[in-house]
Image (tube, helix red, strand yellow):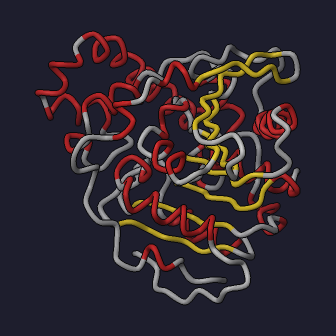
């Protein structure tokens, strides 16, 4: 297995982002458009030059394209064509006509790329999005040039294939969904109350009170969508462990030591099972390192995507 890329050698840096986030100054309505995939409309947020190297960003359970707000502007500015999708049943995308499945989501991303005339791309997936990204790399290897698994689901979720596990996940969605309307209508109050941000976002972030209140609000909007329970059932009924060795592209695995949703031991297991993979584990970081450590994460992923496949990288991992 390869060692971590050079961009990780100096550690994760600060928690959150110092200064004003670039995403706050972007009119995101001008970057969203509908793409019809297999007869169904899918909301896609696209930013960056049309002729840039494509990167597809796939959100997690209860998520939306806003899960990548701290990342999209940076990569677009660097010349990448970024496509962040609202999976059917989440964000603004309506429920699909067919039953939600992990294999179905993988097929959807393949067909989305076909519709956009993109032969291959780097794929970045968080949580359930990582599970889908891995499925895409296994079933449609020609589509995936490089794969980034961020706190990816698919392994420990095997332990939730029972009634108690399903009940816990339903409770989680209810709690997150109940926060959305309240937070959205009181964003100024949230900005002044660190305890409120912690209560609303502590399940996914190690230190939500240190994150921008508007960032927390935008990410909470993904909760309470109709795709949640069908997606949970899809996650817990689709084994992937035995097929992970089939992934043939370079893979970067990114995790946080304080991930309360998907344990960090899964990062080690993904690295053990995927042949050409390396992991980076950020200390004092939760389930969304792309939002908690945006500067380090962006530098890490960019270095990985731009890495010369013939170059022997020999740098220590962050752990």
Residue placed at 82% from the left, 43% from the top?
118
Residue placed at 29% from the left, 61% from the top?
284
Residue placed at 44% from the left, 29% from the top?
172
Q: Is residue 64 above or below residue 312?
A: above
- Relative side of 150 to 249, left or right: left
| Residue 266 percent coordinates (x, y) | 56, 63
**Residue 59 vs residue 169, the one in the foreground:** 59
| Residue 72 percent coordinates (x, y) | 50, 43
**Residue 95 vs residue 85, the one in the foreground:** 85
Rendering quarter of residue 258 = bottom left
- Relative side of 163 to 22, left or right: right
Rendering quarter of residue 269 = bottom right
Q: Is residue 1 above or below residue 192?
A: below
Pick out the residue farthest to the left: 192
**Residue 315 vs residue 157, the one in the foreground:** 315
Q: Quadrant of the N terminus?
A: bottom right
Instruction: Tally the marks.
Output: 0
Q: Quadrant of the C terminus?
A: bottom left
| Residue 206 percent coordinates (x, y) | 29, 50
Q: Is residue 107 above or below residue 227?
A: below
Residue placed at 74% from the left, 39% from the top?
237
């Amino acid at each position: 297995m390869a060692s971590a890329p050079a961009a990780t050698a100096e550690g994760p840096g600060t928690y959150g982002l110092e200064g004003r986030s670039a995403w706050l100054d972007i009119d995101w309505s001008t970057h969203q458009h509908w793409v019809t995939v297999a007869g169904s409309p899918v909301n896609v947020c696209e930013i960056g030059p049309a002729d840039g190297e494509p990167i597809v960003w796939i959100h997690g359970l209860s998520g939306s394209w806003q899960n990548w707000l701290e990342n999209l502007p940076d990569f677009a500015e660097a010349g990448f064509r970024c496509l962040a999708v609202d999976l059917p049943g989440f964000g603004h995308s309506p429920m699909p006509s067919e039953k939600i499945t992990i294999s179905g989501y993988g097929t959807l991303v393949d067909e989305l790329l076909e519709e956009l005339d993109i032969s291959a791309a780097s794929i970045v997936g968080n949580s359930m999005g990582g599970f889908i990204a891995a499925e895409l790399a296994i079933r449609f290897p020609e589509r995936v040039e490089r794969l980034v698994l961020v706190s990816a689901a698919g392994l420990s979720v095997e332990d939730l294939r029972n009634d108690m596990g399903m009940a816990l996940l339903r409770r989680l969605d209810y709690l997150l969904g109940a926060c959305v309307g309240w937070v959205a209508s009181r964003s100024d109050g949230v900005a002044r109350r660190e305890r409120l941000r912690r209560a609303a976002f502590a399940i996914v972030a190690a230190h939500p009170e240190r994150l921008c209140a508007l960032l927390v609000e935008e990410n909470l909007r993904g909760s309470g969508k109709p795709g949640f329970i069908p997606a949970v059932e899809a996650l817990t009924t689709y084994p992937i462990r035995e097929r992970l060795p089939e992934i043939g592209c370079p893979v970067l695995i990114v995790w946080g030591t304080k991930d309360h949703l998907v344990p960090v031991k899964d990062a080690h297991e993904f690295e053990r099972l995927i042949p050409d993979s390396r992991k980076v584990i950020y200390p004092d970081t939760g389930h969304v390192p792309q939002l908690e450590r945006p500067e380090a994460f962006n530098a890490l992923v960019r270095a990985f995507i731009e890495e010369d496949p013939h170059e022997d990288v020999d740098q220590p991992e962050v752990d």
